[in-house]
Image: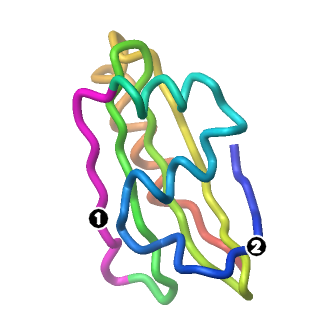
């Protein structure tokens, strides 16, 4: 799911909670994953012309990977999810999808 939106603050600040909570209103499974997360990670993607922040939220039912960036004053995000029990088998493909996300 890619989601554009306007922002007046830096949503790509690396603050996992604040950034992802802004998108969680559209996905109750993401809300649940954030609330019950067993692990949350964020990192800035290096080597890109544009600044991207990659997020991982491991919840009891779903694991989410996301890429978030700012472009032209808008926030763009790509989310992929997998049932947590099958995440390991899908992980390489899901990470490739997120890492290939670009805006033009």
Number of marks drawn = 2
Quarter holding the N terminus is top right
Q: Secondary structure at mark 2?
A: strand
Between 71 and 36, the residue placed more toward the observer is: 36
Task: Please tell me which residue is depicted at 61% across the width and 69% down the height of the picture.
Answer: 102
Identified at 36% across, 68% down, the residue is 14
Q: Is residue 61 left or right of residue 104?
A: left
Check the image and report above or below for 13 versus 99: below
Viewer-side residue, 72 vs 35:
35
The mark found on residue 9 in the picture is: none
Measured as percent of width and height from the top left, residue 97 is found at 51, 48
Q: Which mark is nearer the camera, 2 or 1?
A: 2
Vertical placement of residue 75 versus 65, above or below: below
Residue drawn at point x = 36 percent, y = 38 percent: 57
Who is closer to the viewer here, 29 or 80? 29
Q: Mark 1, residues whose alpha carbon is within 10 Å: few (<14), some, or many (≥20)?
A: some
Instruction: Answer with left or right where residue 69 lies relative to residue 84.
Output: right
* Residue 46 on the magenta segment: yes
Q: Which mark is residue 43?
A: 1
**Closer-to-camera residue (88/67):** 67
Residue 20 higher or lower than 33, as above or below: below
Give residue 64's quadrant in the image: top left
* Residue with the mark numbered 2: 6
Q: Which secondary structure, mark 1?
A: strand
Q: Main secondary structure of the magenta part?
A: strand
**Image x and y of residue 104, in percent:** 72, 80
Measured Cα–Cα span from mark 2 to mark 1: 22 Å
Q: Earlier in the sequence, mark 2 or mark 1?
A: 2
Which coloring applies here? Answer: rainbow
Quadrant of residue 56 in the image? top left
Q: Which residues are magenta?
A: 37-47
């Amino acid at each position: 799911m890619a989601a554009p939106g306007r922002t007046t603050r830096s949503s790509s600040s690396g603050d996992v909670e604040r950034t992802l909570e802004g998108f969680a209103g559209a996905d109750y499974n993401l809300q649940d994953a954030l609330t019950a997360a067993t692990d949350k990670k964020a990192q800035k993607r290096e080597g890109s012309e544009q600044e991207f922040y990659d997020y991982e939220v491991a919840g009891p039912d779903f694991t989410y990977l996301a890429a978030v960036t700012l472009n032209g004053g808008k926030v763009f995000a790509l989310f992929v999810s997998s049932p947590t029990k099958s995440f390991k088998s899908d992980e390489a493909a899901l990470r490739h999808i997120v890492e290939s996300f670009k805006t033009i």
